[in-house]
Amino acid sequence: MNDYSGTPAHGVSHGEALRTWARVALLSFGGPAGQIAVMHRIIVEEKRWLGETRFLHALNYCMLLPGPEAQQLATYIGWLMHGVRGGLTAGILFVLPGFVAILALSLIYGLFQNVAVIQAVFFGLKAAVLAVVVEAVLRIGKRALKNRVMVALAVAAFVGIFVFDLPFPLIVLAAGLIGYLGGRLAPDLFAGGGHGGGAHKGPEIGLIDRMGDVGRAERGVGRALKVIAIFAVLWFGPLLALAVWFGGASVFVQQGVFFSKMAVVTFGGAYAVLAYVAQEAVQSFGWLNAREMLDGLAMAETTPGPLIMVLQFVGFMGAFRNPGSLDPVSAGVLASVVTTWTTFVPCFLWIFLGAPYVETLRGNKALGAALSAITAAVVGVVMNLAVWFALNVVFARIDTVAAAGARLYVPVWTSIDWAALALTLLALASVFWWRLGMIKTLAGAAVLGVMWKLLLAAAA
């Protein structure tokens, strides 16, 4: 794997890049669209490290990969600028602030969850998170559902996961296959819809563009096998060590294996995989309940870094409640590290393995068609997440009805939480009508949640 010593031909030192990536990481709020916009403003418009075309090509490549596209885009650009060292710097810094913030919030949540003020804050945040997820459905849908075929794929994905409980990986694979074949038979119906990042147009030529094809010297079977071998050890070595130390049935090994699977199939962004993780973590593993899953998503929405960092909270709570031979806090911290490690180590593998070949993917219509179909299916999956969250926010009780292989969630209407419904409607108005933005909506909902709980306490 390559690395650049000293200052490369483009003239940007690794120290300057480190400071820039730290700045990008600390400003990376608002989900992938906001994070990509921040990166574009700093890297393309301000620093002019990449031109507009090179940036969008790198983004399109990262969209083809499983995992958080914004973090992978940072890793890829870091690799372009300073080789492996640059990629590691950019990718790790992009995750680090969110990891520290989520760990701190997880500790507070685990230790003080039953404290009234904590409950009140998250009561309000959950309503705002639901509004943010609904906004994500509409944003992705506007980009992806360009024709009836794409709408049909979205509907089929929603029915498959919500009614028939089909595994998310199966939906992704089926959609990708349909897109690949459909792109050959009817390419116009499966053409990509672009990215909704909303980046402003930047300069066409950047510093890195003047260096030519920086990955040419690294293309080869030997180099690829070396990368795979190194990351196989980094990825699975810790899981083997945990299995030896704590036993194969420990919660740490369970989480490492589960989140490793998620790292391979997380096409379509964090909201898509969260639907599957939420159901598995709540129903299959019992690591946390549905309302706590919403609380974790609220944490991830209000901290810098990839939204997929919510998985760290899931891991923390699962081990906090099933610590084995450790105390709950130590188990939670270890699980946070394990979850984050197995989520992001594969991201570096995809970039360092494929980046030298990225130019050969330019304009690959077959892959573009597969991605378009997957993105359409993701709309249905995220809609499932929105419905599932809505039921758990607004209703205290939900029954499950199963028949002929189908499964439906039926709310108990007498258990409706009118205060939660009112807060949700206010949050939706904030997002879609007043357009106050995510951070203001989340903060306002948290304040209203505390005020409501104080009024109830005063009236009691």
Image (cartoon, helix red, strand yellow):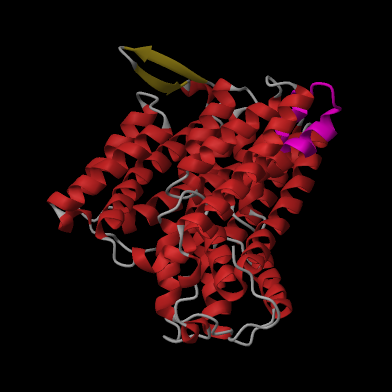
Please check the rendered image and state whether residue 330 is part of the magenta-colored stretch, yes or no: yes
**Residue 158 sits in quarter:** top left
Q: Is residue 256 above or below residue 89?
A: above
What residue is rendered at 46% in x and 38% in y? Answer: 385
Q: Is residue 99 above or below residue 93?
A: above
Please tell me which residue lies in front, 280 or 411.
280
**Left of 100 or right of it: where is 147?**
left
Residue 168 pos. (x, y %): 42, 34
What residue is rendered at 71% in x and 37% in y? Answer: 238
Please tell me which residue lies in front, 412 or 454.
412
Residue 68 pos. (x, y %): 53, 53
**Left of 103 or right of it: where is 72?**
left
Q: In which quadrant will I find the C terminus?
A: top right
Q: In which quadrant will I find the N terminus?
A: bottom right
Residue 288 appearing in the image? no
Residue situated furthest front in the rendering: 222
Q: Which residues are magenta?
A: 316-335
Residue 364 pos. (x, y %): 29, 61
